[in-house]
Amino acid sequence: MKPVAKPSKVTVEAPADHPEVLDVRDAMQQVMDFFDLLTDQEDGDVVWRLISASAKSPLTVECAPYNMKTNASAFSQVMGHVSRIQKGMASLQAGDPLDMSFPSEKIPTAVKMFKRSLNGIGRTRFDFGNETSVEIFPELAKRSLKILVFNDDYEESNYHLSSRKREALGSIDGRIVNLNTDRARPSIRVLEHSSGREINCVISEDLLPEIESSLTAGDAWKRRRVRVRGTISYDSDGRIVRLYDGRIPIEDGRIQFIEPKEVTIEDLHDPDFTGGLPAHEYLDKLRENNFD
């Protein structure tokens, strides 16, 4: 990947159905979000200095990194961060998921940019100052949002943004509601019993062959109950966001589902429950906590 040596540039075009109308608010916000992506939050001395801006549609804005502390250009200083952003945006353009190098705190900004491409603006072209560029257009935005957004909300993004996020080994108990993928990784979507929320459980790779041979669509349709163990990710409020490296008990090549026990009235009946006391006397002692 070539080093950043020239100003970065963003060009925003009007939507195809209204090519003569580019909403200034949407266009300017798209520009601001692009340079927000390029801004490393851990490097507070660097800003993106305005070099030029077009006076008509399409809107083109060009900026260069500048270190306010040293009063000098900062191309070499931003090279690593800009390269990670460029790599992630190129992956989305190719229809691939983001890898771990993409700064997680920038995911909400990327989501806003792709959503804006479906409502307000048309094509956006990003030039990263190293002779490479990435484009966003409506068809690509739809595909990329399926990768970036989960359940049409920002739980995943909020999780990445949280400074109080945590992970711990554990298990969840719930009913299978869907068999899907999570960022191109096989997963099971489980309606978690205690919270009533749907959780993606990414399956451990070494367990995939056994699960593939024993789990069926009918298990999801019947909402069979299962316990999945793995690394649980929690958000800042302590809610489960996702489960990784999921493992499900398997015996003789079959998943061990949690089956409800058949219970009859006779099973519940216990003639000696009150210890020989009449029911009213037992209840009185229970309320007074007096069983001496």
Image (tube, helix red, strand yellow):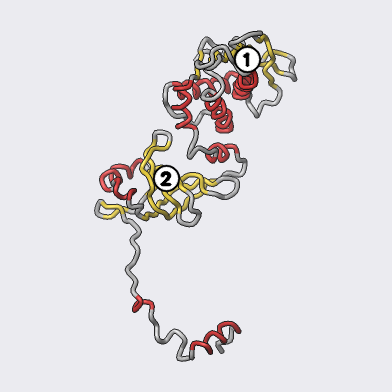
- Which label number is shown at residue 201? 2
Quadrant where the image shows the C terminus: bottom right
Is there CB contact under 8 Å for labels 1 and 2?
A: no
Give the crowd class for mark 1: few <14, some 14-19, many >=20 residues within 10 Å: many
x and y, in percent, of residue 105 in the image = 58, 33
At 57% from the left edge and 20% from the top edge, which residue is drawn? Answer: 82
Residue 24, compared with residue 42, is above or below; it is above
Q: Of label 1 and label 2, which has the lower sequence position? A: 1
Residue 87, compared with residue 189, is above or below; it is above
Q: Tag 2's secondary structure?
A: strand
At 52% from the left edge and 88% from the top edge, which residue is drawn? Answer: 280
Give the crowd class for mark 2: few <14, some 14-19, many >=20 residues within 10 Å: many
x and y, in percent, of residue 44 in the image = 70, 26
Q: Is residue 124 visible?
A: no
x and y, in percent, of residue 213 in the image = 25, 45
At 45% from the left edge and 21% from the top edge, which residue is drawn? Answer: 93
x and y, in percent, of residue 166 in the image = 56, 45
Q: Is 64 positioned to the left or the right of 234 in the image?
A: right
Residue 248, compared with residue 33, is above or below; it is below
Task: Tell me the mark number nearer the camera, choosing from 1 and 2.
Answer: 2
User: Disc 1 marks which residue?
Assistant: 75
Q: Tag 1's secondary structure?
A: helix
What kind of residue is marked 2? Cys
Query: For this rendering, which residue is in front, 42 or 135?
Result: 135
Q: Is residue 248 visible?
A: yes
Q: Is 200 positioned to the left or the right of 24 in the image?
A: left
What kind of residue is marked 1? Phe
Kindly report the distance in space between the C-alpha atoms of the residues bearing marks 1 and 2: 41 Å
Residue 34's image quarter? top right
Query: For this rendering, which residue is in front, 253 or 28?
Result: 28
